[in-house]
Amino acid sequence: MARKLAISVDWQGKFDHKKIIERVKVADESGVDSVWIAEAWGRDCFTLLTLLAAATKRIRLATGIVNVFSRTPAALAQHFATLDELSEGRMIAGFGTSGANVIEHFHGVKFEPALTRLRETIEIFNTLLRQEPLKYRGKLFTLERGFTLRFQPVRPHIPIHLATLNPKALLLTATHADGWLPVMIPIDKLAKEIGGLRNLAVQAGRDPSAIEVTAPTGVTVAAGEAAARAEMAHAGTVAFYIGRMGVYYARQLERFGFVDEVAKVKEAWAQGSAAAAAAVPQAMRERLGTVGDVEACRERLAQEADAGADIHRVNVVTDDLKEYGKTLERLLA
């Protein structure tokens, strides 16, 4: 069986939507499982997903992730039900809470209580997709008029994949989600973390295989100068999560033994982002991702699969669409 590969689209920087669409169409034709569109404080994710829904045939379309604070649960249900209709049932709802910096200082919405907001959003979202009258009493939302969507959703349930870190949030994933989007887990710790989530699902009376796990590490196929740039981009991402995305990701990495490394990266931020990226040691980068040729990336994908991952994040650095498609096919095999 071919691997389930996932590609993503950057949410910042230069943007040529026509080239992005052509690239995703090649991925669709090559057999890639899903494309994930992030949303932070750049472009919104739903506009591009609408274009991709019209331009592709089989690839699943996912938010990777959309936060549950900046839109109401009902607005999220409207977005996803509409896109599921346009894509003929190919949507994945990737949800998360984001962090206090983004929610409070970009969206201007109070961040706490984040886990309650995530759970109630899921419950309201599912109610609307099932076409049940919306009568809901929670800690945050009280909805009494019995609204329903004024069109029949293509599916009564759109798969929900959650980006979660801490124990209580992982329990919510095990009880309420169809997929898990972990981050910042070194490859040598991945099997234990996935096993822990699946054990929680069993304790909740669920089939643990019903939860799709996306590998958090990711691979990038690149050579020469492109590989060097990809290495630095990878280091920059790790550094950014440590120093500029609140405390949760830094604590996560410390839990996996990167205490000294996290401290050095935080200290380096005083000299700027380049210094912070340079402070991420090579050994740490390698445990959190792979940049290399196809064979090195295939080896890493096999390690992820052995650890229990179902979906694998891949990136191929090339502007040649034929080469891009052929490389994806080699990674799929």
Image (spheres, helix red, strand yellow):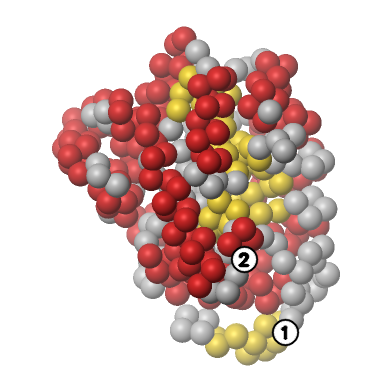
> At label 1, which amino acid type do we have?
Pro
Find disc 1 in the rendering and name its residue. 133
Residue 269: image location, x then y, percent: 21, 36
> At label 2, which amino acid type do we have?
Asp
Q: Around disc 2, counting alpha carbons within 10 Å, would you say few (fewer than 14), some (14 to 19), or many (20 or more)?
A: few
Q: Is residue 250 visible?
A: no
The label number, if any, that marks residue 293 in the structure image: none
Report the quarter where the N terminus lies. Answer: top right
Quadrant in the picture for residue 133: bottom right
Report the quarter where the C terminus lies. Answer: top right
Residue 263: image location, x then y, percent: 18, 41
How many numbered callouts?
2
Q: CA distance from mark 2 to mark 1?
A: 28 Å
Q: Is residue 135 above or below residue 65?
A: below
Quadrant in the picture for residue 58: top right
Residue 20: image location, x then y, percent: 66, 31
Is 253 in front, or is 233? Answer: 253
Find disc 2 in the rendering and name its residue. 207
Is 91 in front, or is 206? Answer: 206
